[in-house]
Amino acid sequence: MELAYMVAARRSHAVALRKRFLSNVFWYAVLIVIALGMIMPFLWMFLTSFKGPNDVIYSVPPQFIPHDPTFANYIRVWNNLPVASFFLNSILVAGITVVGNVLITSLAAYPFAKMKFKGRDSIFYFLLATYIVPVQLTYIPSYILAVKVFGYYNNISALIFPSLASIFNIFLLRQAFKAVPADLIDAGRVDGAGELRIWWSILLPVVRPSLATVAIITFVNQWNDFLWPSLMLQTMDHKTLTVGLMSLQGMFSSDFRGVAAGVGMMVIPILIFFVALQKYFVRGLTGAVKG
């Protein structure tokens, strides 16, 4: 009787393992198909940027691998546009914005998460409600303030200061700070540490994955931003990479190889930045959700 029961249990376990294996195979196949669908446009663009004059861009079936690979497309774009200036402006804007945004939003998130004061939750939820307002609705008053009041027209400062804080990053860091045990903060206060010292020496090291997540989100948003920089920047020397490369539409209107090379210049830095911080990105989002 016991032997029959053990055999039945083993069969049931084997069936369960087989079902789990088939389920995993199915979902992995679905995810692979979705991943291929998402990566194919970028892969086509990247390979097109290396195609020579004799390579076909549009064909049936499509030609993905260049038969005559060349760097001439990148060299032509680099020589016809001040790409070095575009890169420098984009790196300057994105770098200053990332550092400033991480510091300011973490300073704003700390009291909302760990301090007690009257109206704390009401103020936070009021700020959070502003997140539903499309940013495009703020461009007209922001443009008037930047041009008429602060005099930031055609100045990269107009791209930095409006992006030094965002309610989403405050929300994400608030959730991360709430997950930090209160005992750590109490221990710091017992040792005589002030609030700024607690924020800098205790909380920030604990929530480093969330800080990396905020840095990635801010960098990608600032690097890809087009509408606001196109309104504020006019001369070629002040333009960022996304705005400056729009000149490719006129200069290389029929040269899709040049356009692909320009897009590759813009996308590759984002991929490098994300790959460098990807392990912190997932951990940071997980910590924010748990908090």
Image (cartoon, helix red, strand yellow):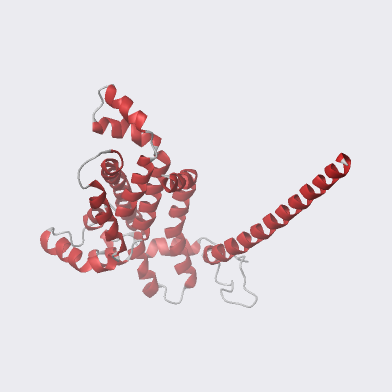
Look at 39% across and 55% down and name the residue there.
Answer: 220
Residue 234 visible to an observer of this rendering: no
Look at 56% across and 73% down and name the residue there.
Answer: 57
Look at 27% across and 26% down and name the residue there.
Answer: 189
Look at 49% across and 48% down and name the residue there.
Answer: 275
Q: Is residue 24 above or below residue 42?
A: above
**Residue 42, percent across and down?**
52, 63
Between 85 and 266, the one nearer to me in the picture: 266
Quadrant of residue 109 in the image? top left
Between 291 and 273, the one nearer to me in the picture: 291
Q: Classify residue 248 as left or right of residue 17.
A: left
**Residue 170, percent across and down?**
31, 49
Q: Residue furthest top?
A: 191
Between 246 and 68, the one nearer to me in the picture: 246
**Residue 216, percent across and down?**
40, 50
Which corner quadrant holds the N terminus?
top right
